Amino acid sequence: MRPAAIRRPWLSVLMLPGQFSITAYKYLTGVSPGLTTAAVLAVMLFTHDSWLFIAVTLACHACVAGFTVRACYGMFNTWKRTRALLRAACETAFDCDDENGGARVVGHDKNPESDRCHQPRPVVHAIIIPCYKETLDTLRETLAMLSAHPGARKYYDIYLAMEESEIEADFKASQLICEFGTGGLFRYVSFTMHPANLPGDARGKSSNLAWAARIASARYGGGHNDDDDYQHDEDNAVVATEDGVVVVTVMDADSHLLPAYFDAVTAYCCRDHDDDGMTMFVPPIVFDRNADAISPVVRCADMLWSAAGIAGLYDSSMITTPTSVYSVTLRLARHVGFWDRGPEAIGEDLHMFLKCYYGTAGKLTTVPVYVPASHCNVEHEQQQLKMTTTTRNVVQRWMLSHEARFRQACRHMWGMVDSGYAIRHAISLINTVTCDQADTCRWRVLARTIVLLHRIYEAHFLPVHYFVNVMACSILPLLIPFAHPWAGFTLQLTKQLRTAAFLAVMLQLILYDRFHAASIKCRRHFVIKAMTAPATPGHVQRAMGTIGFSDRKLQHARQWHYLIDYVLFPIAGTMFGAVPAINAQVMQFAGTKFDYQVSVKPRRPLPSASSSSLLLIKV
């Protein structure tokens, strides 16, 4: 019996048949954040004494209040689940079941035997690390962390995704393969070289991933590549698994993952599920490596960035979007045609989620994995040269930190081009829903799509709408008398909502501190275990000896300065949220192309072999 196709003629007008060109349709949906901001601004200025003003004001404040409450719940849930999972992992010293590829997941059930795979299947982890102008030390730390995992030798395939446009990229990759590709540290180590100026490719992480993922896919058999621009040498093509599962993990060059993450992914994959292999795995992220070396405003902005991703990270959430680090099954990546290569994919993580969601007709399964991915806060390239602690140099470092974080925020907010992509595909999906079951499946897809569009609104529209609305509610009453009988009540109510949202964000940051403490404790435990293990090679020990830990222990008098983070978030949200978003909306109206710039990570000198023990004591 063929699946039923449900047509909705009332939506056909939104498909714009014969009325506008495809280019105009894509442009209008692409600049929808800017169009709606202009509409909100017009309402604030020209209808400030009407029901429309009241409705828009209440809607904006209600959306912000709802987001802060959900973020608090997501942060609390993530902290509790992370603490339980990592506590169990620490107690077992990150043991894994080698017969199942590290399929031991601890912390989910009371019965340990229920965590083991009852139908063992090999699960290979293809880990792609996009690299562009990253230092060797940064990459060494990341590979050293991965090589210390119990399952790395048998189940980790490492792909360094290099860019041809980077000078000496091949030398850097060859050096890393020489250090980590020998001695059996991983199952397989290789690198890919994304050609420069490839037709249709935009600079950025997504196009690099598209190239690397296609080459990696050829090694595992069963796939195909129809893109003539993406030809590659298939001499090394092999079938990696027999009736097994290949999971592609995308992580930044400075991301550190604990083995419990891969154990959880493996355990899920080696069980039978009804998702048909269309699965994405999403961990929370935490900035816990160099937070003590940057400006408090930047530190607060990254805490808010982490919390925004965690806001949708709970089991009952219909939509869970990834931030920087995530995993997809190779079957899903092939099904949707891998990563996109054009300028619309600059927000690579969210764009890939949208592509997978719409590519599976809304049936994508997202699995939260409560093992945090450790990240570095961004630093300026000149910030490394000003490491003395004089007041002048501290201020200079902070200013450089602001500049680097603003560049990164502009790149993040440029990802609002995904708004048009999401809207167009949502209209198409709602207009034609294919389902082989009753109305339950159809309405679930519809509900998830509505929630997805709401999350897109929160990410790309709401920061500017709320900024404009708050400015209007604060300034207009001082300049123009409001005659509407409900205007005064509305202004008083929204003031109370803003106060409640302020307190909710403070609670959110307090919960983040708990989450940060649990994450850093377990990562420190793992590093010490790996560095003291007799089987750990010397160069791996030295690389791990440089790993940073930025504790936030407010009970220590020397770290009371972290309390300032709890009141800086309005400044951080405006400086690195609303302002970059306004900039992106204006530039996208003009059709300006974004100049992609990589974010600089902290640089530390490698210790000598004799100093490794001292570094171990310090951590």
Image (cartoon, rainbow, N blue to C red):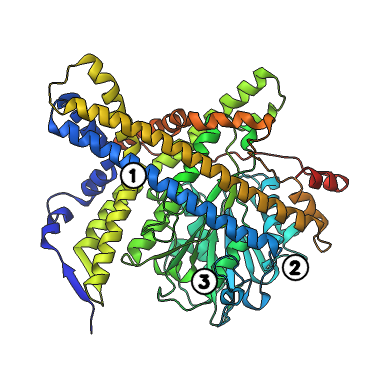
Q: Give amino acid for label 1.
A: Gly
33 w.r.t. 212: above or below:
above
Percent position of residue 613, x then y: 84, 48
Q: Give amino acid for label 3.
A: Tyr
Residue receiving disc 1? 66
Instruction: Classify mark 3: residues with Cα within 10 Å, few (<14), some (14-19) or many (20+).
Output: some
> Mark 2 falls on what kind of element?
loop
Earlier sequence position, callout 2 versus callout 1: 1
Residue receiving disc 3? 268
Viewer-proximal residue among 443 and 340: 443
Residue receiving disc 2? 184
Residue depicted at 49% across the width and 50% down the height: 76
Q: Looking at the image, which residue sits at the far top?
A: 479
Percent position of residue 446, x then y: 25, 62
> Mark 1 falls on what kind of element?
helix
Residue depicted at 46% across the width and 54% down the height: 322
Using the numbered discs, state the Cα–Cα distance from disc 2 to disc 1 in whole angstroms. Answer: 50 Å
448 left or right of 537 in image: left
184 left or right of 291 in image: right
